[in-house]
Amino acid sequence: MRGQTIVEKIFQAHTSGDRPVEPGRIIWLELDVRSARDFAGANVVKNYRRHYGSAPVADKEKTIFTFDLVVPPSNIPYANNQQICRVFAREQGITVYDVNAGIGSHVALEQGLIYPGSTFVGTDSHLNILGAVGAFGQGMGDQDIAFAFRTGKTWFEVPPTMKVIVEGELRPPCTARDLTLAVMGALGSSGALGRAVEFYGPAIEALDLAGRITLASQVTEMGGIIGFIPPSEEVLAFARQRTGRDDIAGVYADPDAEYVETVELDVAELEPLISCPPNPANVKPVREVAGRRIDSAFFGSCTNGRFEDLAAVARVVQGQRVAPHVMATVVPATREVFEQMLRSGVLETLFDAGFIISNPGCGGCASGHLGMTGEGQVQLSTSNRNFPGKQGAGDTYLTSPVTAAWSALRGEIAVPEVQQ
Amino acid sequence: MSKRTRVEGRLWVLNDPDGRLYDDIDTDMIFHNRYLHITDVDQMGQYALDNLKGWEEFARQAEPGDVILAGRNFGAGSSRQQAVDCFRALGIAAVIAESFGAIYKRNAINSGMPIVAWPGLTDQAGHLATGDRLEVDFESGRVVLNGEQVFQAEPFSRVQMDIYQAGDLFAYGKALGGE
């Protein structure tokens, strides 16, 4: 048998039969967890009831709802949709991570629902973020998820795998987000289209879990199915602690695994980067757009909503205030992150600097929570998409928490400097 | 085989404001997030493409049986099924693109909505215009423009044809004896 990549190995362990899993083959994939959120959740329930009536889900222990977009609901249609999910969940005995929990993918990591080598699907197109711990995650539509609720499996075409090697040492003020933007710039919006990606190299190995989450979260914007970062000792220790299972091991590619392409880049001389309108792949050095006046700055999302990201913001703004004309908003990824902010003093630092701090969730990504823009508004955001009109009529620039914080203080896009 | 595997219809060539075939049309351009609370498919068609610059009126002009043509990475972005279902609601016969976003492709296949990948389409786009008649064969990938010019797109994959013939993913699952 030929050597296998990470996605091939995970799939091999999650499908029946001994036939080798290889690119192009369509398999039935067994799902360790299937989920739905407040977006599309009601559509999942509707599909489920139409096709399966009151039949039980395949395994209620492996089926969850996570509400993370319009939390708590700010309008009646979403209040209705969330309640539709709650009622279904009660009937079925399914756990709901309700409106106070935070972003579903992050909650799944914190709760130990997902771990290296496992499989997870749901109605969140950034569920492939779970590649950050070497797990397979995938966002799907409401028909797919209704089917997965009932059967515990899904069909999947095994993707080919490409390799991205990142050399060099990432140095401040550059962060994992700048590395991610560098990869995005190299690959473009469809450079990984329909593929799995595996990330290697010293700059990747040095990333902490929060940095790995940032990188993995943007593979969707490169067109990829998922990007795997081979688990480090830190990641394995986290997973073992969160699951309470000490038998968890990473899934790693065979030395003779086959790749369709290898892309190499070096971040030793990297400078801070930014995605300009109209799409995430429009990556430029921050200095090229420096000086542009901003109206608002958003900190959070599944890409940069970890405690480490918000603590980095606090270090930049410590003892200072955001520019008077800038609306600066912080949305922690989860309740656990919120608690870390509270207990560490980060919350107080951000409050004193003039930030608006909300309960945890996705933020403005899908006009759910906070972070909308009006016509003519210029927004800096640590979120992950800036497609025209997505968060409103304004112009959204995507950048690192450090660059966004540095700019919020000055009221214009600014190149961050290394702080002493 | 019961459902038709060849369709012929009036063409909509989705060009951008510069007159080039639109690449990276994301799901918020197809079906904006402000409508995501809608769960009734019949209500979705009216909003199709209303956040795509230059195509805001598309939903009022499209007719059942029409065929849509777009560039690379059509349906990038979110996992929303509505971005497929809005075209089903309008009775669009097929969406053809240079390539599709991965989740979008699955959603289309699962709901039995015909989508056809046409590698190289961007280079041929000058031959195609809105209002042309286009025929596409899902089994062979053969495309015929105005009954004359012949092009080659990708045929349906096996799973795509199986689900299409069954109707949708649910019917396919039941036909397999599972669910």
Image: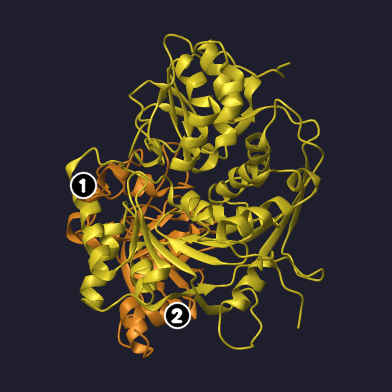
Chain colours: A yellow, B orange
Image quarter of the N terminus of chain B: bottom left
Residue A115 rendering spot, x and y as whole percentages: 58, 61
Q: Residue at x 70, y 25 (%)?
A: A173
Taking A356 as reference, is A337 above or below it?
A: below
Q: Is residue A52 above or below residue A226?
A: below
Q: Position of residue A84 (x, y in %)?
A: 21, 58
Q: Which mark is residue A99?
A: none
Looking at the rendered structure, the kind of residue marked 1 is Ala
Q: Is residue B135 visible?
A: no
Instruction: Mark 1 vs mark 2: tell me if same chain.
Output: no
* Quadrant of the image occupied by residue A15: bottom right
Please report the residue visible at 33 percent of the width from the left and 24 percent of the height from the top.
Answer: A374
Instruction: Tell me what residue is drawn at x 61 percent, y 21 percent.
Output: A315
Residue holding disc 2: B139
Give the chain letter at badge 2: B
The kind of residue on which mark 2 rests is Glu
Which residue is nearer to you in this view: A293 or A127?
A127
Image mark 1: chain: A
Q: Position of residue B39 (x, y in %)?
A: 22, 57
Locate the C terminus of chain B by quadrant: bottom left
Instruction: Determine the secondary structure under disc 1.
Output: helix
The image's mark for residue A79 is 1
Residue B26 higher or lower than B5, as above or below: above
